[in-house]
Amino acid sequence: MSKVAKSITRGLVQALAYARGDADVSRYRVHVPDAVDVRAIRTRLKMTQEEFAARFGFSVNTLRHWEQGKRQPEGSARAYLTVIARAPKSVQKALATA
């Protein structure tokens, strides 16, 4: 795994631990948004629901519920979606080598 992929993976693991409440919060200064526009992220990446779900490890049904407003992503999913929105190629690379 490349140095960049290791760094991204470490960051994702830390973000998820923080979002779950498992991290020592005094050591981190992260912002997990209260809401994310999943459809906007997917649309900006020019992916179908099926492609987005498969590429990033979501269930298509969960993705549809988020996009239809029936459910909202929980903390760790919001953190992950924020990383996807900001660095989609890096996330894809990290997941491809994992």
Image (cartoon, helix red, strand yellow):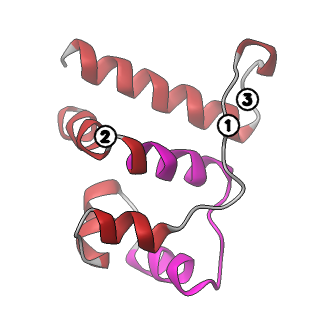
Front residue of this view, candidates 59 and 93? 93
Label 3 – label 2 distance at C-alpha: 22 Å
Q: Upstream in the sequence, badge 3 or badge 2?
A: 3
Q: Which residue is mark 1?
A: 31
Helix, strand, or loop for circle 3? loop
Q: Quadrant of residue 10?
A: top left
The residue at 55%/76% (across/down) is 66
Tag 3: amino acid: Asp
Numbered disc 2: secondary structure: helix
Q: Is residue 92 left or right of residue 29?
A: left
Left/right of residue 28 with respect to residue 1 in the rendered view? right
Where does the C terminus fall, quadrant-wise? Answer: top left
Q: Are marks 2 and 1 in contact (CB under 8 Å)?
A: no
Say which residue label 2 marks.
91
Please give the range of residues in magenta: 60-84
Q: Is residue 9 left or right of residue 5?
A: right
Q: Earlier in the sequence, mark 1 or mark 3?
A: 3
- Residue type, mark 2 in image: Val
Residue placed at 50% from the left, 75% from the top?
Answer: 62
**Picture quarter containing residue 94?**
top left
What crowding class fits label 2: few (fewer than 14 Cα within 10 Å), some (14-19), or many (20 or more)?
Answer: many
Residues marked 3 and 2 touching at CB (< 8 Å) = no
